[in-house]
Amino acid sequence: MGLYQNRIVVKVGTSTLTNEIGQNDLRSYDRLACVLSDVHNMGYEIILVSSGAIAVGANKLQMKTRPTTMRLKQAAAAVGQCSIMFLYDKFFNDYDKAIAQILLNAEDMEVEEKKENLTNTFDSLLEMGIIPVVNENDSVSYTEIESEDRLFGDNDMLSAVVAVLCRAQKLVILSDIDGLYDSDPRLHPCAKLIERITRIDEEVQSLAGGAGSRRGTGGMKTKLQAAKLATSQGIDTVITNGKNPSALYEIINGSSVGTLFVGKRSRTGQRRLK
């Protein structure tokens, strides 16, 4: 089965959706909705994978620190999901777009019948011109929250799994950094951005560094894992800064933005168009 040439999965992280004091960054929501709606108007099918439920919920519940117990994390996630979807619905509606919510667990990807049903749901929504908004079901799924080495890692891996499931042409991971550098730019001012990577080997993985920002849980390690999964299925993957979602225009035009991880092509070098 080939990839859908006009199908793009965009992943946005907690650090993009919240400001430095943990409040909702309304300008980020608005800019993101505007760009995705405009790209949708250009004939592309968009799937948005969004993090932030626990952080947003914790803030709304006026928790002074990020919750540490399972019950509080799941409570915060349940509250945060309502806030996030309310904001997405508001801002996408401003640009005349309908959205739908899909909450996933890791187990949903392991049962063939569930995978088939999910694929049918995504396809039906996209055919109707709706933008699915996907998140990990943190209010129910405890395995992801408990794990020290999260499978989905602030939804980085989830976005890759969704891209593979939906046979998207591109996966765009919007992060709090411009892309992958040859050293940590926070520690080394002379660090250089790597614009193109054709193979994610041990040398590339060694550049990942540590954990993510203090508001998110996914660092560069999980983003590289996501890129490795997606590119293995022929899906071009881009990591770029989420504070500038308009970079998506340049990405779909083939310009160099952030770090591009080139999807592996078949022996014929072709990927089927929709």
Image: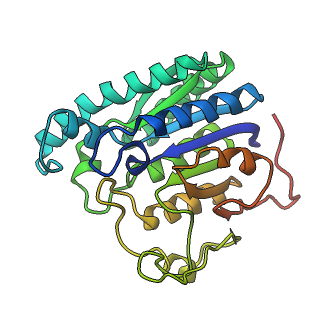
Q: Nearer the viewer, residue 149 or 41?
A: 41
Quarter of the image where the C terminus is located: top right
Q: Residue at x 71, y 63 (%)?
A: 262
Task: Pinpoint residue 50: horizontal percent, then vertical percent.
Answer: 44, 39
Q: Is residue 105 left or right of residue 208?
A: left
Q: Nearer the viewer, residue 72 or 251?
A: 251
Kindly indicate the quadrant of the structure image that contains residue 258.
bottom right
Q: Is residue 220 left or right of residue 171?
A: left
Quarter of the image where the N terminus is located: top right
Q: Residue at x 34, y 37 (%)?
A: 24
**Can residue 226 be seen by looking at this rendering?**
yes
* In this view, 266 is above or below 10: below
Kindly indicate the quadrant of the structure image that contains residue 203.
bottom right
* In this view, 90 is above or below 118: above
Q: Nearer the viewer, residue 260 or 86?
A: 86
Q: Is residue 155 left or right of residue 193?
A: left
**Can residue 111 be seen by looking at this rendering?**
no
Task: Pinpoint residue 175: horizontal percent, then vertical percent.
Answer: 49, 55
Task: Pinpoint residue 76: horizontal percent, then vertical percent.
Answer: 20, 36
Q: Residue at x 72, y 51 (%)?
A: 251
Task: Pinpoint residue 90: horizontal percent, then vertical percent.
Answer: 46, 19
